[in-house]
Structures are given as structure tokens and as C-alpha cells.
């Protein structure tokens, strides 16, 4: 399993390209060959969760065509990994979903490493995203990787199991509830005094980052959102 297919996801492709670049840095540092199939598009999660089953099925089949040759497909997104793992079997059958790994579970469970040789001399608090925690069962895998980073100081986030309020279309359909949940998450994050807030999904980080940027107008010292893959890619 030395050759890996990299699934970067729509959000990262459009808004956060540094995250998949960081994944490549980490995997190549560990000796893996990383491919980027040009035919990849959306995983179909948004469509499936909104009831557009036919559209989601077409996208899932496109994913299967793009990544079918790879034994391991790695993505820096718990939500997209959960889509492939949990919903592809129902949409298209087959076993490609079982070959999709969120970065931390690939590193811990498949590569067998928790120290990737990174150094990041900053204070960091970690938000465990809902799909990673509840759908994939990542547990403390991202934190195990972060604890091994040289120079880092991890600060516990209060109420870490609470959702940030994003939830994809939930934030649009239930804006008031989503905003209240976001306020709680941002207050807890700012209260840590950490320089950075890390997580495994840039969609959640985008949502939290928006709340923190607004909070920064009234106060100082709010954490900067960062995908944990970018911390792992930091050079010693």
C-alpha cells in the first residue's frame, strides 16, 4: 500500500488548497507515493443529505471510476470519508468506501505511526468534528498525532463533544439554532487562550472561523483556525 490516491474534497479544492498540499507533504515524508486523480469531483454528500439520491449516485460512481485502482484513498475530511464509508454501499454497492480513510486513521491504523516528524511551537486547542467523532469513530487519533508534534502545547477545549452548528445544510435550514451553537463553540475556543484552533474538517473550521473573526472585532486573542494536517506538515 505504498501508492495512495488523494481525495482533496470540494471545499479544499475551492477554498483551502494548503490542506491537501499538507497531506501530500506528510505522506511523502513517510515514504508514500501520492497520486491525484484528475477525474475526481464531489463525493455527493450534499446531494445525498438533501434527498437528491440520483445525483448522489452519479457522483459516487464517478468517485469509483476515479479512485477504483487504489487500495488506499486518503482524505483530510471526516465528513467526506464518512459519506464514502457509510452511504456508498447503499448507493452503488461494492467496496470502495472501505478503502477511504480520513488522514489520522490512515496514519495511526494503516501506517502505524503517530509521530510524523513535525514541529509546531504554538498553543493549540482541538475541536473534534461530528462526522469524525460520531460517524468514523476517530476517537483521539488526531490528538495522538498532535501530541507527538515537537514544541506544541495542547490546551483542552471545553465541551469538545458539542457540535459547532455547521452540519452542512443544517446551518442554512436552522440558522438561529446554528448561530447559537456557533456562539457557544467560539466562546469556549476563545476562552482557552490558544493561538490556534485545529480540526479535521475545513467546512467546520470555516464556520467556526467566521464566528471567531466576528468575535475578534470586540476582543483580542481569538484562535486562528487551522486544519491539523497543516500542523503535521510543519517542518522540524
Image (spheres, grey):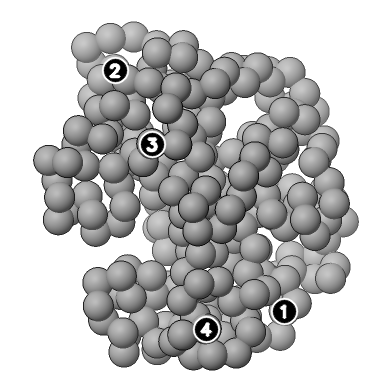
Above or below residue 99? Residue 171 is above
Residue named by callout 4: 89
Please state which of residues 72 and 11 is positioned toward the viewer in this rendering.
72
Q: Position of residue 128 (x, y in %)?
A: 50, 40
Q: Is residue 224 visible?
A: no
Marks 1/2: CA distance? 44 Å
Above or below residue 89? Residue 195 is above
In this rendering, position of residue 121 left or right of residue 110: left
Q: Position of residue 146 (x, y in %)?
A: 68, 32
Report helix, strand or loop for mark 4: helix
- Mark earlier in primary sequence (4, 1): 1
In this rendering, position of residue 114 left or right of residue 225: right
- Mark earlier in primary sequence (2, 4): 4
Q: Residues within 10 Å of mark 1 (few under 14, many from 20)?
A: some
**CB-based contact (under 8 Å), mark 2 and mark 4:** no
- Mark earlier in primary sequence (1, 2): 1
Residue named by callout 1: 70
Residue named by callout 3: 162
Marks 4/1: CA distance? 17 Å
Q: Position of residue 220 (x, y in %)?
A: 34, 9
Name which residue lies at 30% across and 75% down.
47
Marks 2/3: CA distance? 22 Å
Marks 3/4: CA distance? 29 Å
Report helix, strand or loop for mark 1: loop
Report helix, strand or loop for mark 2: helix
Q: Residues within 10 Å of mark 3 (few under 14, many from 20)?
A: some
Report helix, strand or loop for mark 3: loop
Name which residue lies at 39% across and 75% down.
44
Q: Is residue 153 visible?
A: yes
Above or below residue 167? Residue 164 is above
Residue named by callout 2: 216
Q: Residues within 10 Å of mark 4 (few under 14, many from 20)?
A: some
Amino acid at each position: 500500500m505504498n501508492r495512495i490516491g488523494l481525495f482533496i474534497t470540494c471545499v479544499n479544492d475551492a477554498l483551502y488548497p494548503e490542506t491537501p498540499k499538507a497531506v501530500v507533504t506528510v505522506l511523502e515524508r513517510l515514504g508514500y507515493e501520492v497520486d491525484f486523480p484528475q477525474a475526481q469531483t464531489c463525493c455527493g454528500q450534499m446531494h445525498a443529505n438533501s434527498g437528491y439520491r440520483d445525483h448522489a449516485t452519479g457522483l459516487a460512481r464517478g468517485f469509483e471510476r476515479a479512485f477504483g485502482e487504489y487500495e488506499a484513498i486518503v482524505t483530510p475530511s471526516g465528513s467526506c470519508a464518512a459519506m464514502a464509508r457509510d452511504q456508498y454501499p447503499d448507493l452503488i454497492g461494492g467496496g470502495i468506501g472501505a478503502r477511504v480513510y480520513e488522514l489520522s486513521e490512515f496514519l495511526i491504523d494503516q501506517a502505524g505511526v503517530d509521530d510524523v516528524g513535525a514541529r509546531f511551537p504554538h498553543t493549540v486547542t482541538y475541536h473534534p468534528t461530528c462526522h469524525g467523532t460520531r460517524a468514523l469513530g476517530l476517537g483521539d487519533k488526531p490528538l495522538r498525532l498532535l501530541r507527538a508534534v515537537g514544541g506544541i502545547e495542547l490546551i483542552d477545549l471545553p465541551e469538545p463533544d458539542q457540535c459547532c452548528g455547521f452540519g452542512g445544510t443544517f446551518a442554512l435550514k436552522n440558522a438561529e439554532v446554528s448561530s447559537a451553537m456557533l456562539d457557544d463553540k467560539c466562546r469556549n475556543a476563545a476562552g482557552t487562550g490558544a493561538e490556534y484552533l485545529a480540526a479535521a474538517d475545513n467546512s467546520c473550521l470555516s464556520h467556526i472561523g467566521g464566528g471567531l473573526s466576528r468575535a475578534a472585532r470586540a476582543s483580542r486573542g481569538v484562535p486562528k483556525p487551522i486544519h491539523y494536517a497543516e500542523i503535521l506538515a510543519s517542518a522540524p
